[in-house]
Amino acid sequence: MSGNVIKAFVATGTITKGTKSIVLGVATQTSNWSRPESGITETMKTGFKAAVQGDTKALPAQAEKIVMREPQHGNDNHYTAVVLDGNNKYVESRHY
């Protein structure tokens, strides 16, 4: 698990992966920083949703939420996200 733990997030939509409904969100607070809700743009939301929908890697069985921690960055322009269970507990980190 990353040292940059998600403390709060805003739900931005849902997608279906296989037969499962997954809540998407954007972090508004981690153990290292805070992001105002006003800083969450439509471009961030739609780009993240498209990236997660396009990913073919299976999700862990306990996955119920995928929360973007970092918007697009890096040479490959990826999103950094955290997969959470139904109790908002960390399952794994992912790049999309």
Image (cartoon, helix red, strand yellow):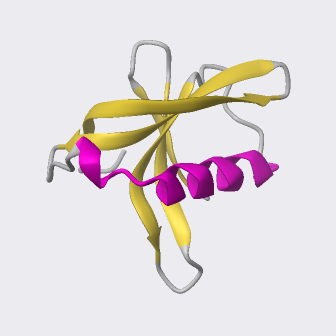
Assign the C terminus to one quadrant of the image.
bottom right
- Who's the residue at 57% across and 31% down the image? 13
Specify the farthest residue to the bottom.
75
Image: magenta residue range:
37-56
Residue 2's x, y, as percent? 32, 50
Q: Is residue 76 left or right of residue 8?
A: right
Q: Is residue 81 left or right of residue 89?
A: right
Residue 37 image-quadrant placement: top left
Assign the N terminus to one quadrant of the image.
top left
Judge whether 35 appears above or below 25 on screen: below
- Who's the residue at 70% across and 20% down the image? 21
Residue 75's x, y, as percent? 53, 86
Residue 4's x, y, as percent? 25, 50
- Who's the residue at 16% across and 48% down the image? 34
Q: Is residue 63 left or right of residue 33?
A: right
Residue 85's x, y, as percent? 50, 20
Magenta-colored stretch includes residue 70: no
Residue 16 image-quadrant placement: top right
Judge whether 9 appears above or below 41 on screen: above
Secondary structure mostly taken by the magenta-highlighted segment of the chain: helix
Magenta-colored stretch includes residue 40: yes
- Who's the residue at 50% across and 40% down the image? 92
Residue 5 vs residue 71, the one in the foreground? 71
